[in-house]
Amino acid sequence: MVNKLIKITIFLTLLYSAASCSDTGIFHSLENEVLVQENNNLENSTVFSNMVKIGNYYYGNAGINIYYRHVNPDNPSTDTNEAAWSKLVLPNGKDNTPAEVNEVFAGDAAVTSMIEIGPDGSESLFISRVSRDGASIVSGIYHLPFAAASAPGTVKSTSWSNQVKTVVPKSGIHFSNIYRLFKAGSDLYVNHIKYQYTSEVDTTASLSTSQLFFSVNPVTNNIGNNLTDSHANITEIIISTFVQDDSDPPKDIIATVEKVIYDGTTNYWLIMNGKSQGKLYNSTDGSTYASVAGNPQDVRYVDIYSVDATRLLLSDTAGALHILDKGDGTFRKLTNSNAWLTGFYNISGLGTITDRIVIGTAGNKGESTYSGEGYVQLNISGDDSTWDWVETNFSDKNNYLSSDLSDASINGFLFDDLANPERLFAYTAGHGVWVNEYISDKRIWALE
């Protein structure tokens, strides 16, 4: 285990030399904080865009790789490297596809999304992957069953089953073919997006197609190699008229799906962004959506979270958080400086914590700099008319304020309530992956 001091200045180094004290003594004398520890072998700049748990393993999606590690750092296993993060073997596209689609993924192939879905306790892993190297643009959706996902050290390319694969030749009109996956309850949503380029060397693209598909129980119902609304296990949700731009008169534009969630009762919620604004949609069956009245106007959306059966949280690119009362349909607005709010997690039940939601921040991507403000906390006790930000941090007693996490852009959280002690992960854009555990009467943040 490597001990790391985060944000230690030259002044502290000189003070240490002059005082001939221990590093821990200096730290406690100045800020009453503790060292940041680095528990595992993950690079401190590793960026996870998503993180899930399947069986006894954590998985993190990091660009062209997926990493995994066992939940127990001291796991007694024949795999001596199981306590550290390892790279998962991904589908190569040749072993998992119909014979007529024979292009394989190149070395630049990125995992554009990753979700765990399926019956509780036996979830499968679904990923979407795309590469542009070679003669064609190759993209696809792949499924790793629970039996393989719960033993990732044994996974081979042939362990993955192909769900969808498309090959787009890089000739004539140039398209980049992308799939984005979303989980809503036990259902799978696929946003199929195409960007058009003017040439092979073009670095900019225009959005040419955006389709949304809906699949019930995808673990048992293969969605087929071609996404089509006539397929028995996949249904297209027509979204071409969902979001309109702000021209006069309004024109239908192509929009991308940002998030789809199921609130645990009978409602599905979907947010989409067009060129200059987004909209919120609601469904009772997961396949037929209607616009929610009273949508905040002239903003694009970042994230959505269902607190309970009656309240919903919606964040936008203006740095605001909107509280929707599902019963009367009213919105209430809370602001949070210039940061985007993304990655919600209800930490009620974490130790003695009650009525708190932790929310990550991300720097405004439209600004010249891209940095966040760590995480914020929302007090959700009582009536939602009184919900507000709280200053007291659930981890103020340790090293959060002096760590890089406090000004990082946080992509999301993963909570493992079965771990001993319970673990809360925060994965960031460029500042590594962090884990918070209750150790020696304090909640401690450490780098993975």
Image (cartoon, grey):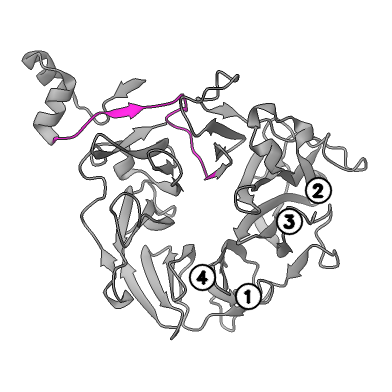
Say what amino acid the circle numbered 4 marks: Gln
Label 2: state its secondary structure: strand
Q: Earlier in the sequence, mark 1 or mark 2?
A: 2
Q: Give how far apart the Cα atoms at labels 3 and 2 are.
A: 19 Å
Residue that mark 1 sits on? 242
Residue that mark 2 sits on? 166
Say what amino acid the circle numbered 2 marks: Thr
The front one of 385 and 278 is 385
Contact (Cβ within 8 Å) of mark 3 with mark 4:
no
Contact (Cβ within 8 Å) of mark 3 with mark 2:
no
At label 1, counting other C-alpha atoms closer than 10 Å, the crowd grade (few under 14, some 14-19, many 20 or more) is many
Q: Is residue 327 above or below residue 349?
A: below
The segment highlighted magenta reads 32-52
Q: Give how far apart the Cα atoms at labels 1 and 2 are.
A: 26 Å
Q: Which mark is residue 218?
A: 3
- Say which residue appears at 61% left-offset and 49% top-offset: 115
User: Outermost residue, bottom direction?
Assistant: 328
- Say which residue appears at 69% left-offset and 58% top-offset: 190
Label 3: state its secondary structure: loop
- Say which residue appears at 61% left-offset and 58% top-offset: 183
Question: How far from the left and from the top, in percent, is residue 391?
Answer: 21, 56
Q: Which mark is residue 277?
A: 4
Label 4: state its secondary structure: loop
Question: How far from the left and from the top, in percent, is residue 229?
Answer: 81, 67
Say what amino acid the circle numbered 3 marks: Pro
Q: Earlier in the sequence, mark 4 or mark 2?
A: 2
